[in-house]
Image: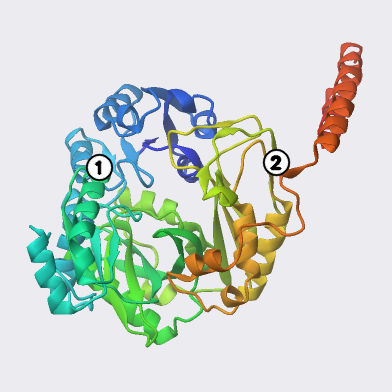
């Protein structure tokens, strides 16, 4: 492997580029028209245009990506997550074109990527799973029969996707028919398949997942767990490693079950097996994500392993250099997904130009980010700006460090969800570890969306705005005069004054 094409954008593309550079691998970026000035494009060794902004005309065009791989001489493709990362046809097309796909083989992806097929594989591997159908439902009548057999409440889920799309909770039999039609229609729009299945709704579960890494020689290790219970509309908001409630024994049982499933399916490379855990510490197989996860940094922080470099080495044909007995979890890590959205306006997306950006740092802080001051956040893709990760010797230290980092984080010109994380991290239930998949919805219902002690931009009094605008205009005019006569004076000094005026 000499040159890797990253078939993605944003922070994950930049993350892969950095891992490749440390290993001496050349990189190729691809971009849509709105991403021409994106950081992953600027950091790659080469960059090629894919097409217009819509993903269907750019990042989802596997044929164009493989043509760029041919033109650039890239001999491998890393799909990141999202887009084509779990597309078995694309993985197969890469192999057919003589390009290494940095991910699992298409056969394993097909067996475990479909939620219904994965449930059958879980049964074969002897894993406990949530009661329900193991095949897609053919009709409302079949759904009613399955629901009557396992009892209400139940959950309808899309077989072909995730992220909360095509999911409907059903509490009463009379609501099932309408929910079935709605879930199937949304699944068809989101994933091109209207297939849904039904399972028992476990009330107040914790969402806990096991990180796996497997090589092509039968080696497979689990790298601890991540707690992903803080969710909004079935989408993860905060992730932690390790979980505050998982004991060594439960970690071993879940990890060994996940490894059994992966080995039975012939799985290779990075993957994640997701479980629901009830209040009695019983765990149930939920699904498998056949790719790298958004939240992989928290696992890296507590294991000391670079998961992306491990992916690359496995794809090169190397055996795993880590055995299960070598895996040790040290300390605690928390990740916040920073989004361009407005928590005070029903989390409405907030695209636009970033006019001011001050990023946090200091002990224990890591930020996976791909935006910069002056960058225009497009409306065409997921609104995630960055992933902020805090590490500490204990969970309490990690949470306090995250709060400090969030206070340092300044993003102007758009709205962000930073205030939401401050509310969560100060909440007594969260700090005590009393969370489940319904925790955030209860918090939002209990407290109004506000950031105490800070006046948001759109609530600054008009007279204050007028005075600041006048002072800025006068300062800017003076600055233009000083720049025109800068002579031998350092331009860094001029730039420093400019930033001081803006602040």
Separation of marks 1 and 2 at Cα, in angstroms: 36 Å
Residue 420 lies, in percent from the top left, at 60, 58
Mark 2 — residue?
458
Mark 1 — residue?
189
Q: Is residue 274 found left or right of 401 in the rendered image?
A: left
User: Which residue is at a point 38% across and 76% down the rendered structure image?
Assistant: 205
Q: Quadrant of residue 46?
A: top left
Which comes before the other along the chain, label 1 or label 2?
1
Q: Taking the image as drawn, is residue 58 in sight?
A: yes
Residue 406 lies, in percent from the top left, at 68, 56
Numbered disc 2: secondary structure: helix
User: Which residue is at a point 14% across and 76% down the rendered structure image?
Assistant: 148
In terms of depth relative to the viewer, which is nearer, 482 or 230? 230
Colouring method of the image: rainbow
Q: Quadrant of the N terminus?
A: top left
Q: Residues within 10 Å of mark 2 (few under 14, many from 20)?
A: few
Q: Quadrant of residue 502?
A: top right
Q: Is residue 494 found left or right of 293 in the rendered image?
A: right
- Closer to viewer: mark 1 or mark 2: 2
Q: Quadrant of the C terminus?
A: top right
Q: Is residue 278 found left or right of 112 in the rendered image?
A: right
In terms of depth relative to the viewer, which is nearer, 446 or 22? 446
Q: Eyeballing the image, is 503 above or below 244? A: above
Q: Eyeballing the image, is 85 above or below 324? A: above
In terms of depth relative to the viewer, which is nearer, 165 or 120? 165
- Which residue, as the protein is rendered here, is positioned at the far front? 174
Residue 229 lies, in percent from the top left, at 45, 68
Residue 369 lies, in percent from the top left, at 57, 44
Q: Is residue 490 found left or right of 252 in the rendered image?
A: right
User: Which residue is at a point 61% across and 75% down the rendered structure image?
Assistant: 431
Q: Taking the image as drawn, is residue 134 in sight?
A: no
């Amino acid at each position: 492997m000499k040159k890797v094409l990253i078939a993605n954008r944003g922070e994950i593309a930049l993350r892969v580029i950095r891992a490749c550079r440390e290993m001496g691998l050349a990189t190729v970026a691809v971009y849509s028209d709105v991403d021409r000035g994106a950081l992953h494009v600027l950091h790659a060794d080469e960059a090629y245009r894919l097409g217009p902004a819509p993903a269907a005309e750019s990042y989802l065009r596997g044929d164009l990506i493989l043509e760029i791989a041919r033109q650039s001489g890239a001999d491998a493709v890393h799909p990141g997550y999202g887009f084509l990362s779990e597309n078995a046809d694309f993985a197969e097309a890469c192999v057919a074109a003589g390009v290494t796909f940095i991910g699992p083989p298409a056969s394993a992806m097909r067996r475990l990527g479909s939620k219904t097929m994965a449930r059958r594989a879980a049964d074969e591997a002897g894993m406990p799973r949530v009661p329900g159908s193991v095949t897609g439902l053919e009709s409302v009548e079949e759904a009613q029969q399955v629901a009557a057999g396992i009892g209400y409440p139940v959950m309808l889920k899309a077989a072909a996707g995730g992220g909360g799309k095509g999911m409907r909770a059903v509490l009463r039999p009379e609501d099932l028919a309408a929910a079935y039609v709605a879930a199937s229609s949304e699944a068809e729009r989101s994933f091109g398949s209207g297939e849904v299945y039904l399972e028992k709704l476990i009330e107040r579960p914790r969402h806990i997942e096991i990180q796996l890494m497997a090589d092509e020689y039968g080696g497979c290790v689990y790298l601890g767990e991540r707690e992903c219970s803080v969710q909004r509309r079935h989408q993860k908001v905060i992730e932690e490693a390790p979980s505050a409630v998982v004991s060594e024994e439960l970690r071993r049982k879940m990890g060994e079950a996940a490894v059994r499933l992966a080995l039975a399916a012939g799985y290779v490379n990075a993957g994640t097996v997701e479980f629901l855990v009830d209040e009695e510490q019983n765990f149930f197989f939920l699904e498998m994500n056949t790719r790298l996860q958004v939240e992989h940094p928290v696992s890296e922080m507590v294991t000391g392993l670079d998961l992306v470099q491990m992916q690359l080495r496995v794809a090169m044909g190397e055996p795993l250099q880590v055995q299960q007995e070598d895996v040790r979890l040290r300390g605690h890590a928390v990740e916040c997904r920073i989004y361009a959205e407005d928590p005070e306006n029903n989390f409405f997306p907030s695209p636009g130009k970033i006019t001011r950006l001050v990023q946090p740092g200091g002990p224990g802080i890591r930020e996976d980010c791909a935006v910069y001051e002056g960058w225009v956040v497009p409306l065409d893709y997921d609104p995630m700006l960055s992933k902020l990760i805090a590490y500490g010797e204990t969970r309490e230290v990690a949470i306090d460090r995250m709060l400090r980092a969030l206070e340092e984080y300044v993003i102007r010109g758009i709205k962000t969800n930073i205030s939401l994380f401050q509310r969560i991290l100060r909440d007594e239930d969260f700090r005590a570890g009393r969370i489940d998949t319904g925790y955030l919805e209860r918090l939002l219902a209990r407290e109004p969306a506000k950031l105490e002690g800070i006046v948001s931009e759109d609530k600054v009094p008009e007279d204050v705005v007028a005075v600041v605008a006048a002072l800025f205009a006068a300062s800017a005019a003076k600055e233009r005069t000083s720049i025109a006569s800068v002579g031998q004076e350092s331009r860094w000094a001029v730039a420093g004054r400019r930033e001081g005026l803006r602040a």
